Image (cartoon, grey):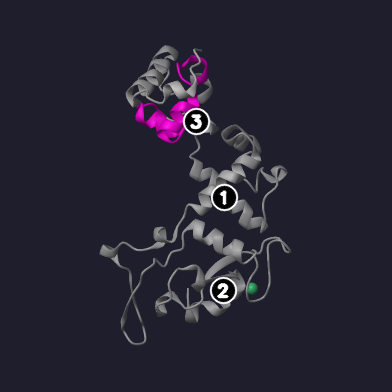
C-alpha cells in the first residue's frame, strides 16, 4: 500500500477518492471493499475517505458499492443506540465486560474496532447524545401538531412533538439519575425496572416535550397515573 500523509490529501477531489475505492473493488473482483482491504490495496488511508464522506458506509454508498456484512459497517447511530439501551437497562454507564449478549447486540470488539477503544466509543456516544438540540424536537411550522382537548374540543397548538427523541429521553434519564421521581425505583437497585419519560403537564393539555415538562417515572407509576390523565 502506498501511504500518503493525511495533509497531502486534503485537496484530493471527491471523485478521485471514490474512483480509487472502485479500482480496489475491481482489482479484488468484489462489489464491496472492507476497511482493511482498502487499507492494504488503496492509495489513501481509509480514514481519509471516512472523514471526507462521514462514514465507511457512506463511502461505499457513494462509490456505488455494496455495504459489506462486516461489523465495521454497522451504522454509527445503531452502535450508539445499542449503548443507550444498555445504559438505560443498567441505569448507569456500562462497563467493558458487560458489552456482550444478551445485554448488548454487538460485542465489545466491534466497538474497539470501530472507535479504537471502549472509552473512545463512550466519548463519541456523549458527543452524539449532546448533538440533539431542542430544535430537533420542534415541529415544522408547516405541520404544527395539534392536540384536541377532549373536554372542551379546543385545539391546542404545540411547539414540540409529542414523541420524545431517543437522545432527549436519555438526557432526562441522566438528569433524573435513572430513578423514578415518584417511587424511587431504579434499574441500578433492581433488575428489570423499566423507566419511562412522562409529561408533567400532559401533552394533550398543552404540555410541551421540553426538559422542564418531562420527568422519569417507572412503568408502574407512569401507567398507574397514566391512561386516565396522560400518555
Ligand atoms: Zn415508580
Work out whether 192 lies above or below 125.
below
* Residue 207 drawn in magenta: no
The residue wearing badge 1 is 126
Residue 189: give x, y in percent of width and height.
74, 64
Q: Position of residue 143 (x, y in %)?
A: 28, 64
- Find the residue positioned furthest to the left: 142
In this view, the mark in front (2 or 1) = 1
The answer to whether the residue bearing label 2 lies less than 8 angstroms from the nearest atom of ligand 1 is: yes
Query: Which residue was labeled with disc 3?
Result: 69
Q: Upstream in the sequence, badge 1 or badge 3?
A: 3
For label 2, the residue is 222
User: Which range is magenta?
Assistant: 39-66
Q: Secondary structure at mark 2?
A: helix
Q: Could you tell me which residue is drawn at 38 percent across and 26 percent down? A: 65
| Residue shown at the point (41%, 31%) measured from the top left | 52
> Does residue 50 show up magenta in the picture?
yes
Amino acid at each position: 500500500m502506498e501511504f500518503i500523509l493525511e495533509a497531502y490529501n486534503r485537496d484530493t477531489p471527491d471523485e478521485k477518492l471514490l474512483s480509487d475505492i472502485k479500482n480496489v473493488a475491481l482489482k479484488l473482483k468484489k462489489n464491496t471493499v472492507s476497511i482493511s482491504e482498502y487499507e492494504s490495496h488503496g492509495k489513501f488511508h481509509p480514514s481519509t475517505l471516512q472523514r471526507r464522506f462521514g462514514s465507511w458506509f457512506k463511502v461505499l454508498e457513494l462509490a456505488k458499492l455494496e455495504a459489506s456484512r462486516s461489523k465495521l459497517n454497522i451504522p454509527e447511530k445503531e452502535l450508539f443506540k445499542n449503548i443507550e439501551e444498555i445504559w438505560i437497562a443498567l441505569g448507569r454507564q456500562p462497563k467493558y465486560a458487560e458489552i456482550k449478549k444478551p445485554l448488548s447486540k454487538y460485542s465489545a470488539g466491534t466497538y474497539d474496532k470501530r472507535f479504537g477503544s471502549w472509552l473512545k466509543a463512550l466519548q463519541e456516544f456523549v458527543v452524539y447524545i449532546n448533538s440533539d438540540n431542542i430544535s430537533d424536537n420542534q415541529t415544522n411550522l408547516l405541520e404544527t401538531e395539534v392536540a384536541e382537548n377532549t373536554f372542551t374540543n379546543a385545539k391546542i397548538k404545540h411547539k414540540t412533538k409529542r414523541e420524545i427523541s431517543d437522545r432527549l429521553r436519555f438526557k432526562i434519564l441522566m438528569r433524573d439519575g435513572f430513578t423514578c421521581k415518584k417511587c424511587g425505583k431504579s434499574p441500578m437497585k433492581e433488575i428489570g425496572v423499566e423507566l419511562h419519560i412522562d409529561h408533567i403537564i400532559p401533552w394533550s393539555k398543552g404540555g410541551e416535550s421540553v426538559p422542564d415538562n418531562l420527568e422519569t417515572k417507572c412503568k408502574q407509576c407512569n401507567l398507574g397515573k397514566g391512561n386516565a390523565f396522560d400518555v
